[in-house]
Image (tube, helix red, strand yellow):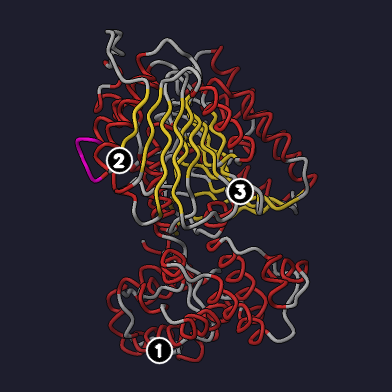
């Protein structure tokens, strides 16, 4: 039993609320809530864990459960937290998270600390334990405090260590805080990652199209006159240059793809609501025209800001016409750059970091300028890495090929599902479900083929690696309130095909039998999923696939190490059974 499950079980057994535990333990209700939902776990030797055990024992005494002593509760909690493996797992997990969040380079760190890079890599993955963990944590803390001194980096550190932004301004204080956190820190998950997934989970492209009237948008064809070349200074003129670029691109005859790359603080532009509306309308016109957009995102910014920026692009990603990219490594913090180009126009910008409002921006439609800017854009794309691959219904074959090509590699795989796994469902049970839902014979064949591919995929995966799946098992009350549907995201199908109770129980029995018969497969049953429309497939250390089941059915394969690490370390599911 995991820590959060044990905590919820104690509360159920004592018929106690989270508020009662907060009062008895002296911890805040928010902290108790994070512990119960597995968003955060206390360190095995922390004061917070001691308080929790004392609070549970106090409530037990009040309610006559004298068998629950503070020592017994503390011992049980520590066992659930893997106290005997604490020195291995806590330091490795926190070191890995630190490297990912701050883009630390192991080679550079190894040279500074006189370590072998492979030694650091093995510590990061938990394959090696430092001879002196405290000394190792102190060295890493000193290095990180010296290496990461910018305001943005210290802000990232403050979020990671759950401290106020100004608390880590001093290098010595920062180093000491890092040392303590590496050894004993609570492994939390960035709230901004969860927010991003929640927005993706609840997003409905059809509602969005109706709201912005994208389906009624007409791309104008009336002639207009813009200067072929103009130099702009200042923020207001820069806004106009960007709008002129969008207008020129939308109204031209060119079908060349559009390129956008900027490391400037675009949020200053977004504060002007009128500009934001015109900007989104211009982007919508470009996409309505059918042009493809290569967008190179700037990810060298605080994590929360990065995730907030990605949230704003969700509606446009759903069109399938955007390829998101990023540039590896940390780039200079002195200058800001911008390059937008299409077959009709280009905008080039430059500024000094922190002085965005006084930058210089060139707008050009010149026939000699456009090939130059296109070559620059192509050169950037050659060095850029895909932030994520996006698969819509037209790329079903490509997505399936990607999965089959990857599961032949040995490794660890994990899936977080909102329904029972499709690969464990028998053809006979599947046929009954389809017939009860009135599915046509031709569509039944398509669904049967999709489920057969799922079985073949998992069979191939288990030949080369280990696989863990997490999925909800509904209580009778939850099932009656809303009968679950088959998982059809792999088919790019928006249709909801509901179970009845008999078929649901049969599928659950088949899943448990599959787990019993396949030692490389682990099935983790929980009571309720954190999401309704998202399935998440993790190839540990490589990529994370996020599949949206409907509105629309779409798959995102995320490759950026920082995003992948955040998703890998998240706990997605909540055990509802412990709360009922």
Rendered location of residue 194, percent (x, y): 42, 54
Quarter of the image with the N terminus in it: bottom right
Give the SS element for disc 2: strand
Q: Residues within 10 Å of mark 2 (few under 14, many from 20)?
A: some
Whether residue 412 appears in this view of the structure is yes
Question: Which residue lies under the disc numbered 1?
Answer: 54
Vertical order, 553 against 419 (above or below)? above
User: 101 above or below 441?
Assistant: below
Q: Residue at x 38, y 44 (%)?
A: 311
Q: Secondary structure at mark 3?
A: strand
Q: Mark 1 against mark 3, which lies toward the viewer? A: 3
> For residue 438, which numbered disc appears in the image?
none
Residue 204 screen position, x and y as percent: 34, 32
The residue wearing badge 2 is 233
In the displayed structure, does residue 101 sit left or right of residue 519? left
Q: Quadrant of residue 69?
A: bottom left
Q: Nearer the viewer, residue 335 or 215?
A: 335
Tag 1's secondary structure? helix
Which image quadrant is residue 533 in?
A: top left
Residue 538: numbered disc? 3
Q: CA distance from mark 3 to mark 2?
A: 46 Å
Q: Mark 2 and mark 3 in contact (Cβ < 8 Å)? A: no
Residue drawn where x is 48% and y is 30% of the image: 259
Q: Is residue 441 magenta?
A: no
| Location of residue 517 with respect to 482 vertically, above or below | below
Q: Identify the mark nearer the N-term, 3 or 2.
A: 2
Q: Which residues are magenta?
A: 271-275
Q: CA distance from mark 1 to mark 3?
A: 38 Å
Q: Which is more toward the observer, 31 or 502?
A: 31
């Amino acid at each position: 039993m995991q820590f959060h499950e044990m905590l919820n079980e104690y509360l159920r057994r004592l018929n106690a609320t989270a508020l009662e535990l907060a009062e008895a333990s002296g911890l805040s209700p928010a902290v108790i809530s994070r512990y119960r939902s597995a968003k955060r776990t206390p360190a095995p030797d922390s004061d917070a864990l001691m308080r929790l055990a004392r609070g549970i024992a106090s409530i037990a005494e009040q309610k006559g459960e004298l068998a629950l002593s503070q020592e017994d509760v503390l011992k049980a909690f520590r066992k659930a937290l893997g106290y005997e493996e604490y020195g291995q797992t806590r330091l490795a997990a926190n070191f890995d998270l630190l490297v990912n969040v701050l883009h630390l380079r192991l080679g550079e760190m190894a040279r500074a600390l006189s370590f072998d890079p492979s030694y650091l890599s093995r510590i990061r993955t938990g394959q090696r334990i430092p001879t002196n963990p405290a000394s190792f944590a102190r060295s890493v803390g000193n290095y990180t405090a010296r290496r990461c001194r910018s305001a943005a980096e210290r802000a990232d550190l403050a979020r990671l260590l759950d401290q106020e932004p100004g608390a880590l301004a001093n290098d010595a204080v920062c180093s000491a805080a890092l040392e303590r956190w590496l050894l004993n820190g609570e492994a939390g998950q960035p709230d901004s990652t969860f927010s991003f997934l929640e927005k993706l989970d609840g997003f409905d492209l059809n509602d969005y199209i109706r709201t912005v009237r994208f389906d009624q948008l007409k791309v104008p064809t009336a002639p207009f006159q813009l200067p072929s070349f103009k130099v702009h200074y200042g923020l207001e003129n820069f806004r106009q240059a960007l709008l002129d670029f969008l207008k020129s691109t939308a109204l031209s005859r060119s079908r060349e793809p559009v390129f956008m790359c900027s490391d400037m603080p675009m949020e200053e532009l977004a504060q002007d609501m009128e500009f934001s509306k015109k900007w989104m309308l211009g982007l919508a016109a470009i996409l309505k025209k059918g042009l493809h957009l290569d967008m190179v995102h700037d990810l060298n910014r605080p994590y929360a800001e990065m995730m907030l920026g990605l949230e704003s692009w969700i509606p446009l990603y759903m069109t399938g016409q955007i390829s998101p990219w990023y540039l590896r490594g940390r780039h200079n913090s002195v200058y800001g750059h911008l390059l937008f180009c299409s077959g009709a126009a280009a905008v080039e910008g430059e500024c000094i970091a922190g002085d965005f409002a006084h930058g210089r921006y060139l707008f050009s439609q010149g026939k000699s300028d456009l090939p130059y800017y296109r070559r620059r854009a192509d050169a950037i794309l050659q060095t850029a890495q895909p932030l994520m691959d996006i698969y819509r219904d037209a790329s079903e074959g490509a997505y399936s090929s990607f999965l089959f090509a990857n599961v032949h590699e040995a490794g660890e795989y994990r899936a977080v599902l909102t329904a029972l796994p499709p690969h464990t469902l028998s053809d006979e049970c599947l046929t009954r479900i389809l017939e009860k839902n009135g599915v046509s014979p031709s569509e039944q064949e398509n669904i049967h083929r999709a489920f057969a591919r799922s079985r073949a995929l998992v069979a191939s995966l288990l030949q080369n690696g280990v696989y863990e799946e997490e999925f909800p098992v509904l209580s009778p009350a939850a099932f009656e309130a809303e009968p679950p549907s088959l998982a059809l995201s792999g088919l790019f199908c928006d249709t909801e095909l509901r179970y009845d109770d008999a078929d649901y129980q049969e599928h659950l029995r088949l899943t448990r039998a599959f787990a019993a018969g396949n030692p490389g497969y682990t099935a983790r049953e929980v009571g309720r999923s954190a999401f309704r429309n998202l399935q998440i497939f993790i190839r540990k250390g490589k990529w994370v696939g996020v599949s949206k089941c409907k509105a629309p059915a779409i798959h995102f394969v995320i490759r950026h190490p920082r995003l992948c690490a955040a998703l890998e370390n998240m706990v997605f599911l909540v055990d509802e059974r412990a709360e009922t």
